[in-house]
Image (cartoon, rainbow, N blue to C red):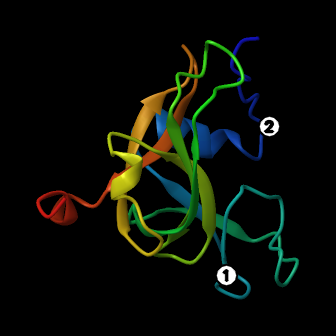
Amino acid sequence: MAKPTPRPTPTEQPFYDACAQHQLILQHCQGCGHVLFYPRTHCDQCQSEQLVWKEASGQGSIASYTVVRRGVSADFEAPYVIALIDLAEGPRMMSQIIETEPEALAVGLQVSVDFAAWSEDITLPVFRLHPALDANA
């Protein structure tokens, strides 16, 4: 079983294009100011279709996480950490936390975005503990 690879829709394509350039972008509603993730055709708060892409800070905090100790296939090298990240801009994103021992993680710790090649064509955002915290780990 190979890793499932995202197949971006036209709505999602700008997000994946930015990830390929190591940029995290989020949609902002011009109608109500809400910041959205995952990419959508309209605001989930006010239904406006006036959405614009803006670069995100790439900062966030761990809302929850789990350590996967047995991957579903050899394509998923265990252990790895999947987390819900509360982005500084407001949305919550599910992603992987990399290059950190699971024992060093805790809800509330600050993280920064990085990017990892998922396949030949797809780069995804991943997170690591914020560099200022790495010195204390």
Which residue corresponds to the image point at 75% horizontal and 71% vertical from the top-left?
Answer: 50
In the rendered image, the residue lying farthest to the left is 135
Judged from this view, the residue extending furthest toward the right is 47
Q: Quadrant of the C terminus?
A: bottom left
Q: Amino acid at mark 1?
A: His
Q: Residues within 10 Å of mark 2 (few under 14, many from 20)?
A: few
Residue 16 lies left or right of residue 110; in this view the side is right
- Which disc is residue 9 wearing? 2
Q: Quadrant of residue 112?
A: bottom left
Helix, strand or loop at mark 2: loop
Q: Quadrant where the N terminus lies?
A: top right
* Image x and y of residue 121, in percent: 58, 18
Circle count: 2
Q: Is residue 110 above or below residue 31?
A: above
Q: Amino acid at mark 2?
A: Thr
- C-alpha span from label 2 to label 1: 22 Å
Is 62 drawn above or below residue 9 in the view shown? below
Residue 125 in the image, given as x and y percentages of width and height? 49, 44
Q: Disc 1 designates what residue?
A: 34
Q: Callout 1: few (<14), some (14-19), or many (20+) C-alpha neighbours within 10 Å?
A: some
Measured as percent of width and height from the top left, residue 2 is found at: 71, 12
Determine whether, in the image, residue 46 is placed left or right of residue 76.
right
First in residue order: circle 2 vs circle 1: 2
Which residue corresponds to the image point at 53% horizontal and 37% vertical from the top-left?
124
Name the spot of residue 14 as percent of width and height, x first: 62, 44
